[in-house]
Image (cartoon, coloured by chain):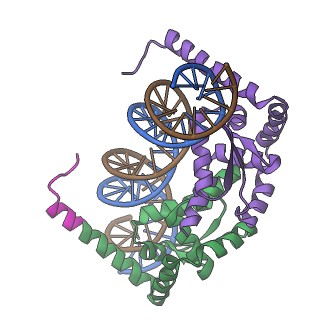
Chain colours: A green, B purple, C blue, D brown
DNA sequence: ATTATAATTTGTCATTTTGCTAATTGACAA
DNA sequence: TTGTCAATTAGCAAAATGACAAATTATAAT
């Protein structure tokens, strides 16, 4: 019953929905690949993964500096069936699948390098443009 | 897909979980019976029902001043199966079932009368004891 | 018509959630 | 051992959520 709330809350979010959909079609994905797909900050994606893992919906495998996530064997089968019917018809997910194809075609090292660049670029832009700094 | 988020968000709440469980075992329940079960304010329960109805999980039938809710035929079957397995083993739900037996044994009019009394009583208590009034 | 009442809508407040940046951790590499 | 880099944790602001009381609506009864 505790599990019920963990699971439903984990599923009740658009980003996590896209993550689950991506993992259902791709066996294993590492955090930086999901960052590339969702275009969210790495810590945000990491926290989404923690929520999904806390609900027992995904499992992780550490491989050097990378962490690979996959759908857990404990993911309730009936939920999985419903998810397939309900989610994969959506246009947004089809777009994600196409984007993922490109992501998978790029070496993981390159993805991470690009993400680091984007991050420092954002910093530069922010610092030079934003006059309303917070303490 | 829009439906996916409506449905998962509707399910991802403890009170609404108990409401769905109660409706699964009792065909039809009116708002005041659910108020009695959950011991929440009537507007709160009404809102929960609106969320469930917005997700297409329940339907309503108006009967005079009363509104009766029931599980919708559109409630996804796989979700229903999962819900049965996941929720009905919980102690909290078994307690609810026992409480509901008593509630169903009392005429609806009496339930509503008692709830009105409780409400005015709460007002009296609040006004006389609480020195920290808000504007 | 007027009153009473079951339910809904509205407005407020406290809590939770989701996003970010900054700081930290853990593992590889030089 | 020192530096680098992927991922996580910590801390904060904005948005969403769930609770309540008060006001409104809609229906039955007087």
Residue B21, x across and y down, in percent: 75, 48
Magenta stretch: includes residue A2 = no
Residue B102, x across and y down, in percent: 83, 31
Residue farthest toward the bottom in the current orientation of the protein: A105
Residue at image location 21% in from the left, 63% down from the top = A126
Residue at image location 55% in from the left, 13% down from the top = B124
The answer to whether residue A101 is left or right of residue B73 is left
The answer to which quarter of the image holds residue A102 is bottom left
The answer to which quarter of the image holds residue B40 is top right
Magenta stretch: includes residue A126 = yes
Looking at the picture, does residue B1 appear above or below residue A6?
Answer: below
Q: In what quadrant of the picture does the C terminus of chain A appear? A: top left
Tell me where the magenta segment starts and ends, as one range. A123-135
The answer to which quarter of the image holds residue A120 is bottom left
The answer to whether residue B55 is left or right of residue B76 is left
Q: Report the number of numbered marks.
A: 0
Residue B19, x across and y down, in percent: 70, 45
């Amino acid at each position: 019953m505790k599990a019920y709330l963990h699971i439903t809350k984990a599923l009740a979010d658009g980003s996590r929905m896209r993550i689950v959909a991506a993992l259902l079609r791709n066996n294993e994905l590492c955090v930086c690949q999901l960052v590339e797909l969702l275009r969210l900050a790495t810590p945000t994606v990491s926290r989404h993964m923690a929520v999904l893992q806390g609900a027992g919906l995904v499992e992780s495998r550490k491989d050097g500096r990378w962490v690979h996530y996959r759908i857990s064997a404990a993911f309730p089968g009936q939920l999985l069936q419903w998810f397939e019917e309900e989610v994969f018809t959506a246009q947004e997910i089809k777009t994600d699948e196409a984007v993922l194809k490109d992501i998978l075609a790029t070496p993981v090292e390159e993805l991470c390098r690009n993400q680091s660049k984007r991050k420092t670029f954002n910093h530069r832009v922010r610092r030079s443009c934003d006059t309303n700094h917070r303490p």
